[in-house]
Image (cartoon, rainbow, N blue to C red):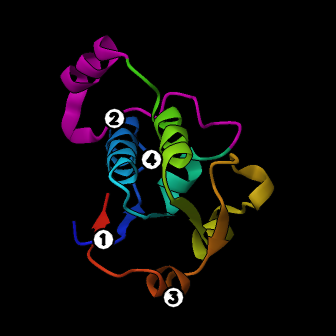
Amino acid sequence: MDGQTLSLVLFSGTDDKLNAAAVLTAGAAAMGRKVNVFLQYWALDAFRSDRITKDHGVAPEAGSEGAAILARHGGQHWSDTFRQAKSIGEVAIHACSLSMEVLGLSMEDLDPLVDDQEGVASFFMNVDGPVTFI
């Protein structure tokens, strides 16, 4: 283990991609890696407290067949996986300041999973390895 922080930039707000990000986050946290998640645009929108558990659909490439497969699979909601990751490791979830401004959001609009808001420069100050964009 090289100890590098897992840095994720989440742009997509579809349930399949948010689930993938949550699983990566939980896996890294379970292995003792620090995780920084940066929420932009549609991912940030999915973290609104009044929308976090609603159906956010799947990526266009999944199509109706992919949506049906995921619906049959069921399983834990991605927000619960993020909560689990935060309970087992050092996980910070940051809202992008620019996205907050564009979407007209305040921290009060977001689920408590989101720790704070910061700009891109602040996010990159804590990056000590590759960044994964989802």
Indicate the amino acid at tag 2: Val
Tell me the amino acid under the disc marked 3. Ala
Q: Quadrant of the N terminus?
A: bottom left
Helix, strand or loop under label 4: loop
**Helix, strand or loop under label 1:** loop
Q: Nearer the viewer, mark 4 or mark 1?
A: 1
Magenta part of the protein: which range?
A: 49-74
Can you say whether 111 is above or below 78 in the image? below
Q: Which mark is nearer the camera, 3 or 2?
A: 3
Residue 11 placed where, x, y %? 41, 59
Relative horizontal placement of residue 32, taking residue 121 as reference (left or right): left
Quarter of the figure with the C terminus = bottom left
Q: Please tell me whether residue 27 belongs to the stretch shown in magenta.
A: no
Type of the residue with mark 4 = Gly
Tell me the element at label 2. Answer: loop
Q: Which residue is mark 2?
A: 58
Q: Earlier in the sequence, mark 3 or mark 4?
A: 4
Q: Earlier in the sequence, mark 1 or mark 2?
A: 1
